[in-house]
Image: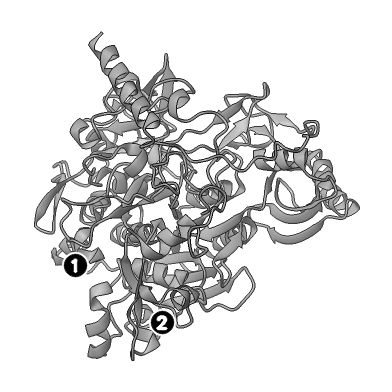
Amino acid sequence: MENRLHRLFLVSVLIAGLLNGSIVFSQPRADLNSETKRAQPETAVRGNSQGLWDGRGSIDDPFVGENLSPDLKEALQKLDPKSEVSVILQSDDIDDPELRGLIAAYGGKVRSEARNLQMLEIDATFDAVLAIAASPRALHISSNLKTKSFGHIETTTGLQTLREAPATQNLTGTGVGIAIIDSGIFSEHDMFSGTSVASRVVKEEQFTLGGSEDLYGHGTHVAAIAAGRGGRPGSSQSANILRPYQGVAPDANIISLRVLTDTGTGSSADLIQAFDWIWANRGRYNIRVVNISLGTASVETWRNDPLCRAARKLTKAGVVIVAAAGNDGKNLLGQKTYGAIHSPGNDPSVITVGASNTFATDTRSDDGVATYSSRGPTRSYFVGPNGAKVYDHLVKPDLIAPGNKIISARSRLNVLTTLNPTLEILTDGLDPKRQVVYMSGSSMATPVVSGAAALMLQANPTLTPNMVKMILMYTAQPLAGFNHLEQGAGQINIDGAVRLASLVRRNLRPKTALDAPFLTTAEMPVQNSNIAGSVVQWSQGIVADKGWVQGSKLITHYQKVYGKGMLLSDGLLISDGLLISDGLLISDGLLISDGLLISDGLLISDGTPIFDYSELFGGNILLGDGLLISDGLLISDSFLIGDGTLLPGGLTLGVRTLLFGE
């Protein structure tokens, strides 16, 4: 009875928040209700509302629902059937003669191929898309969505603590390759210099128009946060200027994959081409980490989304994918919004990063989630056989990292700072190779985590992507007053993450038994870190699917879900509305919440605390899906809040956040 009254009280608090306008959810796309909608197009329906496999895609990673993405199907109902659209076709054989012949017969043009991922970028009319969708080789067709970019690091993240410890002071990312998928890199900047080579940017590839140099200014800034050096070796002048802004993994190799234009835009097809290149070249450049400080609208379920499927294929091969959550955490009125995680950050295999605001202090006592940082749950969905939308409702982000007013390298020719000179910190009279600027956003938080992953993999190269993800969350620090949908497991703690990664056994294999020792020592590591003179407690838990898993067995006992090709949520089952361990892939005895968002209309966690440190998570406020996230709400396109509503000066709120922070 007491629990029920407690839940009713909390729900009433949330209703009051809705009524007074302090809490809202992201706005729906602009509708075309003024037009008469055409009849529903006939599309193939796969599986059922539970996503059971029906033969399309692999049985361990099936497609679900219809074979047209929801936004593409909506466009088919409203627009001229002779209108041309750019789409991503996923197939099991992109060279099938019948499929190719069908595309050609309807006048379709293949713009690009991702052969390793079995995907095609096609320009075709809506009528042609419907005809192609009827082919058994067309596993799924999605809109070719546009992508956009979403910036004292050492001290406040625990990196300084790590570098002062004798056992870890030499961990700088040496030998690890970090792929930066962005707007290119100004590779001649001193922050990318090596000890014995002119530049650690070992490879540059372009998947959009233009050369390899970063004319937009975003990719250079991002890359230096992840792997920038604090000055050119042998130059005291360079070190005096740049040392305060050194990145997380200053000896890591950098692979620049340019997918954004000089105005900071691109497409899903460009990003897929970059993923395809990584798949083919990951061994040659030892690419262990991929940084994606950009994204697009996450409309369709992660099971079908081509960006998500490409990311999962890379994680299955041992590559850690780190993606920005997005900058849609508030609307034009400054109200908090939920449900605006971007793709591919809506995929459960990806490490999704939100932004924290350190308020320019090293100590963490005043840190909080940046107001613009996108919050979960994920609202991507598929349509079941009965026509109902089945939402993913994954808890995201996975963790947060400093992302507000971050100072890092400036590209030589820079659209962002040319139009916004107040971003420049050190430029006047300086060699362009030593200039820095500040930027803000989840774009800047993401490379902090990518750099940390590189340090972890240098410390222990045998870590799988799921081990890296688990350790980052387990050692993160929960920030007071913010829930899981805002901060995931908490704010990154690089000292704790690398220290724990170093203790993981190096002989763990796919056949290793559940509950086998996970660490090289039987002694439990100290589960806190000293950061900027304060003791920081680890979260000692992880977000997984719709729930929270907590307990020391996560690090003392091997979990089968840590293997390649697994999801951390694979060992969780829903039984009578409760999340439980299956006892086969994840240990019994772990504290598992009964689901933060089990299904439409049910309360998050149904009275069970979201997190044991209840006072740190806003008093265990429970969110009801049917209450606050009504059916039919979609996140705003890419960066644009309210579908491109402009602020004074012509900037969207998302871009303004990126430039000026808060």
Of the pair 386 and 510, the residue shown nearer to us: 386
Residue drawn at (39%, 43%) of the image: 335
How packed is label 2: few (under 14 Cα within 10 Å), some, or many (20 or more)? some
Specify whether 619 is left or right of 291. Answer: left
Q: Mark 2 points at which residue?
A: 199
Which element is circle 1 on?
loop
Q: Is residue 475 above or below residue 275?
A: above
Specify whether 617 is left or right of 514. Answer: left
Residue drawn at (45%, 35%) of the image: 394
How packed is label 1: few (under 14 Cα within 10 Å), some, or many (20 or more)? few
What is the C-alpha distance between the residues marked 1 and 2? 23 Å
The image position of residue 61, as x and y in percent, is 58, 38
Of the pair 161 and 412, the residue shown nearer to us: 412
Q: In which quarter of the image is the N terminus?
A: top left
Q: Mark 1 points at which residue?
A: 169
Q: In which quarter of the image is residue 425?
A: bottom left
Residue drawn at (35%, 31%) of the image: 17
Specify whether 652 is left or right of 508. Answer: right
**Visible in this render: residue 151?**
no
The image position of residue 354, as x and y in percent, is 37, 50
The image position of residue 474, as x and y in percent, is 27, 43
Specify whether 28 is left or right of 491. Answer: right
Give the residue type that dot 1 points to: Gln
Q: How many labels does the image show?
A: 2
How is the structure coloured here?
A: one colour
Q: Quadrant of residue 421?
A: bottom left
Question: In the rendered structure, which disc, 1 or 2, sits on the residue that comes first in sequence?
Answer: 1
Q: In this view, does 549 lie above or below 406?
A: above
Which element is circle 2 on?
loop
Q: Which label sits on residue 246?
A: none
Give the residue type that dot 2 points to: Ser
The image position of residue 516, as x and y in percent, is 29, 36
